[in-house]
Amino acid sequence: MALPIRGTSYMIQRRHWSNPEFYQTPISIALGSFDAIHYGHQELLKHRFIGLEPWVLYFRRAPQTLYQKQFIGMVRSERQRIEIFQELGLKGAFTLDFLYEISTMSGVEFMEALRQRLFIRSIVVGEDFRFGKEADANSYELREWAKQYSIHVKIIPLLPNRENSEKFSSSSLRQAIHRGSFSVIRESSGFPYAIDLRDVKHWYGNGSWHYLVADNGQVLPSPGLYETHNGDVIKIENGLVSSSSLLEQALLHDTL
């Protein structure tokens, strides 16, 4: 699979936590932050249930942004994630911002609030899934809560990385990007890492295009010069990407 470069129209349905209107179509929903959308994430996203629209819940910005001052960013922009969700065949994406209101909810309070917004008949989570204030609930407690509403909960065992016995980890992929090992992202997900330049402030000056990439929340490589797959050389410095060409996304070669 290749990451969509030109972008696609958002045929996937999108709803935000702030939308009070109840979605009446029965759905199954995969829960998680879904940052890198690596193969471990995709194990959750591929499950389908007869008569239910497949949806995903994801955080627009990672929960770590609220309590980790040194959080280095998401592997993919929100727009890239939506495009991948669509390519994976999902019909809907429900998003929320991890703000104080959400962070203070217990696991049960969070699920009750979610149930008031979506007609959930099935939930898919990883076995290490935790949620609620201070991660007070786990996937098996979620299953117990769901029984009272006859909601089916499917718990997916952790999928080990194909290259080693460790589980897939978005945090390790962020570190790989930071050190310039971009091919690791494709190897662990089927989709390459690309700096998304489409929805950020940009301008032309001094013979180059400049993009304020800090706005899209993505993790960036260390400052320096990088070659893109189309032969351009970009400069990354102080949250800015500079290029002689007008770019939509920058797919980078690994650094040596």
Image (spheres, grey):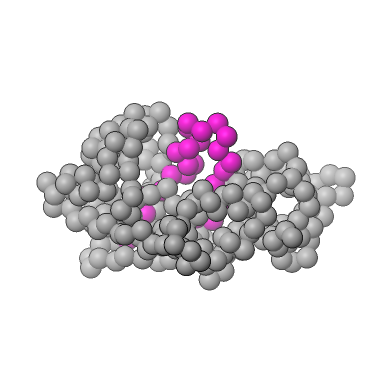
Q: Residue at x 43, y 57 (%)?
A: 167
x, y (%) of residue 38?
Answer: 47, 60
x, y (%) of residue 11?
Answer: 44, 61
30, 133: nearer the viewer: 133
108, 196: nearer the viewer: 108
| 9 vs 179: above or below | below
x, y (%) of residue 42?
Answer: 41, 62
Visible in this render: residue 86? no
Visible in this render: residue 190? yes
Q: Which residues are magenta?
A: 54-82
Q: Is residue 41 left or right of residue 144?
A: right
Quarter of the rendering occupied by the C terminus? bottom right
| 141 vs 176: above or below | above
Image quadrant where residue 202 sits: top right
Q: Residue at x 38, y 49 (%)?
A: 32
Q: Residue at x 34, y 29 (%)?
A: 104
Confirm whether the magenta stretch covers residue 74: yes
Which residue reaches farthest front? 165
37, 19: nearer the viewer: 37
x, y (%) of residue 9?
Answer: 51, 61
Q: Is residue 219 left or right of residue 20?
A: right
- Figure disc tally: 0
Q: Residue at x 77, y 48 (%)?
A: 224
Q: Is residue 122 left or right of residue 211?
A: left
